């Protein structure tokens, strides 16, 4: 059976503000990570699966509202702890389509499953993280994990859909840390540079002057070079986090944050995201404080270089607001030692600046809350008696 294709469609009523990226494209459903291509050597702690397998110039990123095809039957869902081997997923031939929001990541990575769950293309590295996290203090802050399912040689991580409890959710993806590439990607690019034309194109789309003369002549840049450029252009370097995308309940979605770097600009974006709702800002702050506490207790966190992971913010009109930790595809175990996550990165120390970024993110939201309250203080109406 052919792998179902995923189609991105603009949701009814969506308006495209500013330079939108990709909202409304037909996605290439080609599987990037198959069971075989994702297997990492048994000795490997490496999160860097063969770079050639992991990307192709024809693939692109998902930015917005997607329609997921629905696979499977909830009866087959098994708890991860009971799962000894991959579950063979009972794909059905009649597939329903489900509207969903995917603000970042690779196109075609997700499928919908029944019972409020989703399937994400397997990366063995992410699977290992989910398995280890089942025993960790971070468990309450990650999607519920139901194991790996397999069909026709293609494997998926099965997890809860965090959008499910929300009615027309507002969603924001914040990529955490001061660095978005693994140290091993850097080493590899140095040893075997593989300049990429697609990354060059993405770079000149934003800034024609960004590539060096050599890169211009090659019409290509290496991935670490591209990733470092993205980090300095956005707030990743200066604040330790960056906004990747926002989808609001009115259907609008924005992913044009590549140049959003200054705290004052992020504050405006955040205030707009929450519609100036102070209670929601406070709920987000409380949840981030809980995450901060859980991180301080987490054995997993101390032991892993957390790269490219995001905090997913969700709220809706009912006032419900949650933050979840997602995307452990590039979260890599240390062979020895522990990380602090709040000291500067120098090549070799594997620090990722996650905690520093989280602290800055909390400060930014506090500042957003304060400035909103100051600017919108209700002046008491003078009593007619005076
Ligand atoms: N469990 C979930 N529930 C709801 N939405 C999710 C969930 N996991 C991911 N998403 C959505 O999908 C998007 C991409 O997720 P994720 O970062 O895990 O994908 P990825 O392909 O690993 O990304 P990247 O290529 O940047 O590493 C998120 O921004 C979010 O909108
Ligand atoms: O956000 P942009 O500007 O589109 O750039 C992409 C982004 O940094 C992704 O995180 C990265 O995937 P990984 O995190 O999986 O490395 C991807 O690399 P890729 O093209 O090699 O997939 C980049 O192209």
Image (cartoon, rainbow, N blue to C red):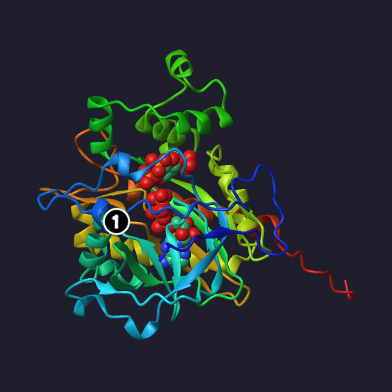
**Residue 182 located left or right of residue 313:** left
In this view of the protein, which residue sits in the foreground, 193 or 289?
Answer: 193
Any part of residue 285 in sight:
no
Residue 69, relative to residue 213: is it above or below? below
Element under disc 1: loop
- Image quadrant in which the C terminus is located: bottom right
- The residue tagged 1 is 123
Q: What residue is shown at x 40% (from left), y 81% (from top)?
A: 73
Image location of residue 103, percent across then percent down = 52, 55
Q: Quadrant of ligand 1?
A: bottom left
Q: What residue is shown at x 40% (from left), y 35% (from top)?
A: 227
Residue 112, relative to residue 107: is it above or below? below
Image location of residue 303, percent across then percent down = 18, 54
Residue ranking furthest to the front: 1
Image location of residue 56, percent across then percent down = 40, 40
In this view of the protein, which residue sits in the foreground, 16 or 106?
Answer: 106
Residue 268, relative to residue 179: is it above or below? below
Residue ranking furthest to the bottom: 75
Question: Is the CB atom of the residue marked by disc 1 within 8 angstroms of ligand 1's nearest atom?
Answer: yes
Which quadrant of the figure has residue 350? top left
Any part of residue 303 in sight:
yes
Q: What residue is shown at x 19% (from left), y 46% (from top)?
A: 46
Image location of residue 340, percent across then percent down = 23, 48
Q: How many marks?
A: 1
- Image quadrant in which the N terminus is located: bottom left
Say few, some or many: other residues with alpha carbon within 10 Å of mark 1 (under 14 / 14 to 19 / 20 or more). Answer: many
**Residue 172 located left or right of residue 152:** right
């Amino acid at each position: 059976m052919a792998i179902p294709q995923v189609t991105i469609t603009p949701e009814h009523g969506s308006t495209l503000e500013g330079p939108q990226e990709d909202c409304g494209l037909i996605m290439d459903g080609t599987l990037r990570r198959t069971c075989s291509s994702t297997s990492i050597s048994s000795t490997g702690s490496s999160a860097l699966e063969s770079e050639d397998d992991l990307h192709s110039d024809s693939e692109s990123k998902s930015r917005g509202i997607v329609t997921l095809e629905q696979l499977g039957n909830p009866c087959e869902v098994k708890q991860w702890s009971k799962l000894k081997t991959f579950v063979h997923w009972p794909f059905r031939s009649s597939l329903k389509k489900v509207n969903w929001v995917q603000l970042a990541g690779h196109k075609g990575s997700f499928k919908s499953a029944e019972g409020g769950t989703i399937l994400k293309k397997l990366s063995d590295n992410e699977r290992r993280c989910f398995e280890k996290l089942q025993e960790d203090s971070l468990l309450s802050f990650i999607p519920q994990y139901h194991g790996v399912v397999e069909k026709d040689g293609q494997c998926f991580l099965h997890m809860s859909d965090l959008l499910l409890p929300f009615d027309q959710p507002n969603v924001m993806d914040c990529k955490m840390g001061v660095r978005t590439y693994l140290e091993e990607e850097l080493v590899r690019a140095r040893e075997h540079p593989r300049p990429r034309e697609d990354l060059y194109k993405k770079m000149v789309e934003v800034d024609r002057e960004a590539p060096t003369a050599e890169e211009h002549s090659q019409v290509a840049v290496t991935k670490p070079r591209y990733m470092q450029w993205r980090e300095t252009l956005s707030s990743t370097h200066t604040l330790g986090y960056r906004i990747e995308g926002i989808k609001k309940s009115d259907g609008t979605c924005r992913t044009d944050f590549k140049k959003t770097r200054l705290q004052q600009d992020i504050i405006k974006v955040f205030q707009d995201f929450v519609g100036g709702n102070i209670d929601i800002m406070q709920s987000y702050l409380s949840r981030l404080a809980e995450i901060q506490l859980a991180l301080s207790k987490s054995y997993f966190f101390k032991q892993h270089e957390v790269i490219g992971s995001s905090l997913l913010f969700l709220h809706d009109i009912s006032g419900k607001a949650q933050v979840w930790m997602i995307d452990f595809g590039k979260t890599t175990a240390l062979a020895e030692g522990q990380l602090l996550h709040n000291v500067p990165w120098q090549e070799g120390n594997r620090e990722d600046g996650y905690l520093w970024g989280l602290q800055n993110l909390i400060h930014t939201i506090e500042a957003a809350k304060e400035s909103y309250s100051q600017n919108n203080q209700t002046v008491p109406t003078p009593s007619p008696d005076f």
